[in-house]
């Protein structure tokens, strides 16, 4: 099977594998070369695969999409962290999630301020004397 792991800006993985293990909303699953074609939404979790050399590789993925078509498996996620040591991978994933949470909070706060300013100006415009 050929595995491709894509982010918006990069192709992280593109290699021949013997097995892919991922997690969807209804639980984890394993894909082998002769499994039927499928498409599913991934939840934030660990994705692992086994290379032809027998090495198991782990990736921390956020929400994404997995599509198996023929002998090709394509995974597309916004954020992926690769690592061999599960402890370090967990720490890196937690750190990245915290960073994303802080950026998201800041973006939401900025958006709320913009919305409040828009509403205030709209109300002021409606109260202006009409000539």
Image (cartoon, grey):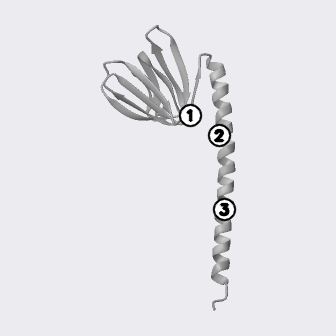
Q: What residue is shown with label 3?
A: 114
Q: In the picture, residue 99 is in which quadrant?
A: top right
Residue 14 spot, x, y in % from top left: 46, 22
Which quarter of the figure is the N terminus placed in?
A: top left
Residue 36 spot, x, y in % from top left: 30, 25
Label at residue 100? 2
**Camera-nearest label, 3 or 2:** 3
Relative placement, left or right, of 123 versus 24 is: right
**Is disc 2 in contact with disc 1, using a CB cutoff of under 8 Å?**
yes
**Is disc 3 in contact with disc 2, using a CB cutoff of under 8 Å?**
no
- The Cα atoms of the two marked residues, 2 and 1, are separated by 10 Å
Alpha-carbon neighbours of circle 3 within 10 Å: few (<14), some, or many (≥20)?
few
Give above or below for 41 relative to 83: below
- The Cα atoms of the two marked residues, 3 and 2, are separated by 21 Å
Relative placement, left or right, of 54 versus 95 is: left
Give above or below for 102 relative to 26: below
Residue 95 spot, x, y in % from top left: 68, 32
Q: Which residue is painted at 42% across and 22% down in the image?
A: 3
Which quarter of the figure is the C terminus placed in?
A: bottom right
The numbered mark, 3 or 1, whose residue comes first in the sequence reads 1
Label 2, secondary structure: give it: helix
Q: How many marks?
A: 3
Q: In the picture, residue 75 is in which quadrant?
A: top left
């Amino acid at each position: 099977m050929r595995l491709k792991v894509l982010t918006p800006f990069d192709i992280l993985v593109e290699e021949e594998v013997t097995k892919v293990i991922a997690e969807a909303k209804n639980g984890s699953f394993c894909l082998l070369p002769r499994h039927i074609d499928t498409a599913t939404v991934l939840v934030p979790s660990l994705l692992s695969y086994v290379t032809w050399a027998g090495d198991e590789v782990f990736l921390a993925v956020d929400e994404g999409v997995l599509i198996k078509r023929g002998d090709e498996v394509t995974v597309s996620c916004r954020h992926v962290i690769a690592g061999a040591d599960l402890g370090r991978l967990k720490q890196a994933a937690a750190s990245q999630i915290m960073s994303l949470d802080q950026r998201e909070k800041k973006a939401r706060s900025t958006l709320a301020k913009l919305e409040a300013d828009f509403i205030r100006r709209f109300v002021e415009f409606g109260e202006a004397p009409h000539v």
